[in-house]
Amino acid sequence: MKPIVKKTAIVNKFTLHWPDVPNSQLIIDFNPLIVFFGLTGHFVLLHYQARPVGLRRFGAMYQG
């Protein structure tokens, strides 16, 4: 079961939605981490539990 990923107007922020799971939309915003750690250039961030309750496994990966 793969999520639908939609980019938002804000860079480094997007939404995930699982069509088979009601009320499963998640808003993922990596900007606070990028700013806090001063990340620039090429980097990868992982959100381990970026899934709705009941689907908790590997979550979201973002490559900047």
Image (cartoon, grey):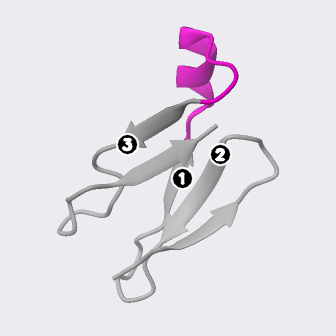
Q: Is 12 placed above or below 52 here?
A: above
* Residue that carries the numbered disc 3 in the rendered image: 47
Q: Which residue lies furthest to the front in this view?
A: 42
Q: Where is residue 31 in the image (x, y as percent from the top left)?
A: 63, 29
Direction from residue 24 to residue 31 in the image, left or right: right
Residue at screen point 78% across, 43% down = 10
Secondary structure, mark 1, is strand
Using the rendered view, name the quadrant where residue 14 is placed. Answer: bottom right
What distance separates the C-alpha of mark 2 from that of mark 1? 7 Å
Whether 6 is among the magenta residues is no
Q: Earlier in the sequence, mark 3 or mark 2?
A: 2
Image side of residue 50 versus residue 30, left or right: left
> Is the residue under label 3 in contact with that under label 1 (CB below 8 Å)?
no
Q: Distance between the residues labelled 3 and 2?
A: 12 Å
Q: In which quarter of the image is residue 42?
A: top right
**Other-residue count near label 2 (Cα within 10 Å), few / some / many at <14 / 14–19 / ≥20:** some
Judge the density around disc 3: few (<14), some (14-19), many (≥20) Cα neighbours within 10 Å: few
Tag 2 residue: 13
Q: Please, what secondary structure does the residue beneath circle 3 have?
A: strand
Contact, CB < 8 Å: mark 3 with mark 2?
A: no
Q: Nearer the viewer, mark 2 or mark 1?
A: 2
Q: Could you say which disc has been placed on residue 63 in the image?
A: none
Q: In this view, does 45 lie to the left or right of 15?
A: left
Question: Are there few (<14), some (14-19), or many (20+) residues within 10 Å of tag 1?
Answer: some
Residue 55 falls left or right of residue 14: left
Q: In which quarter of the image is the C terminus?
A: top right
Residue type of the residue flagged with mark 1: Ile
Residue bearing mark 1: 27
Question: What's drawn in magenta, residue-wise?
Answer: 29-42
Residue found 33% across the figure and 83% down from its top: 1
